Amino acid sequence: MKQNKEGFSLVELVIAITVLAILTIPILAYFTNAAVSTSRGKDTQKANMAAQSVLEELNSCTSFEQIEEELKEDPEHLWQVDEVGPKQSKLTKTVEVDNTTYQAKVTVDFDYSTTNSDGDDVDSKYNDYPAPQLTEVYSPNSVVIAESDETETAVSNFYYQTYKTDNISVTKAQIREDMSRTLCLDVEKSGELYLVKGYYRYEYDGETYEAVLENTKIEASKLQNIYLFYDLLREDVLNENVEINITGIDLGIPDDEKINLFFVCQKGSFEKPDGYSLNVNGTNKNLLHYYSNDITVQGVTLAESKIVKHSTGKRIAAITVDVYDDRDGTTRLASLQTSKGV
């Protein structure tokens, strides 16, 4: 058999190279685009991480004044405050993620639009309005004794106790109408701690039932305020007793070191009747300063200042964090939006 030992002609070789080039170019373009997309995706992911870190830092601030004023004074944060205004503030910061530097631009908007119950856009009305500063109440320096619904528990206790011992026909409604209540507070200093116990003592037909609302320990160096939030026992009760027992505290304590006790009668199921008052008794009751929310308190002298202060300020804002490539400062890689209230 005769073999053909001739090679490819020049035309055939050109055609083969051309076909190979046509097939190779899209493949190379695919891998090139894939590499670019992967790189871009990593940049976007890191930029989002940078934006999230900025939001977390802003959320750690307890006020907008802290964001605008204090951050720029902290050299570790590297903040630059570009604009501070009643409607809008702007800040910038350099952020580094995985050895890549970005520039974060923050817009804090206090005059944003919101939606009402009808679905219409309306201007925000939550800034510069007087509002209570509840952070004063719920602070590390305070013990809060909050009302819990113990009346029905006390009624049930007396009802079954009376039924079992005397077999007397009495209704829960009768017990509820006839029982009395004393608001009790025990404060004991033990070493470097204060032991604070707040409870109700109910009485009916010679029997007693105690319901503990709060029983806690707090460092003596921290305790400044005790808040007693309570509901009325009944709408026909015009006077309730308060029993204060203070032990372990130096009787010669200076006035500026005395603990403040706040009586806060809440708007519960009953309206406070005209003439309603508290009558304070107990041991060493004069070792406390007393305040109330427009309640007449007998047996102690009330301070004149308000229980909770009201102030105006920046309270709610829409926050936008835009992250840019630090090389040109114009290419936006990520944007996050949220709201913050203080």
Image (spheres, grey):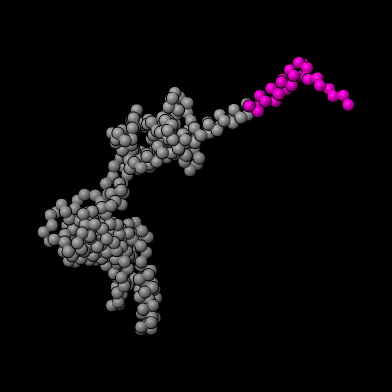
Instruction: Pinpoint residue 327: horizontal percent, then vertical percent.
Output: 43, 25
- Name the one closer to the observer, 94 or 15: 15
Using residue 288 as the reference point, say whether residue 327 is left or right of it: right
Using residue 44 as the reference point, say whether residue 303 is left or right of it: left
- Whether 25 is among the magenta residues is yes
Instruction: Pinpoint residue 208: horizontal percent, then vertical percent.
Output: 29, 74
Q: How many labels does the image show?
A: 0
Question: Which residue is at a point 71% across and 24% down the rendered structure image?
Answer: 20
Tell me the quarter of the image containing the C terminus.
top left
- Span shown in magenta: 1-28
Question: Which residue is at a point 33% across and 61% down the rendered structure image?
Answer: 147
Q: Quick check: 22 above or below 156? A: above
Question: Which residue is at a point 34% across and 56% down the rendered structure image?
Answer: 267
Tell me the quarter of the image containing the N terminus.
top right
- Name the one closer to the observer, 125 or 51: 51
- Whether 328 is among the magenta residues is no
Using residue 192 as the reference point, say whether residue 317 is left or right of it: right
Instruction: Pinpoint residue 51: horizontal percent, then vertical percent.
Output: 43, 36
Picture quadrant of residue 108: top left
Instruction: Pinpoint residue 194: horizontal percent, then vertical percent.
Output: 23, 60
Whether residue 206 can be seen here: yes
Q: Name the residue furthest front.
A: 1
Q: Quick check: 46 above or below 279? A: above
Picture quadrant of residue 248: bottom left
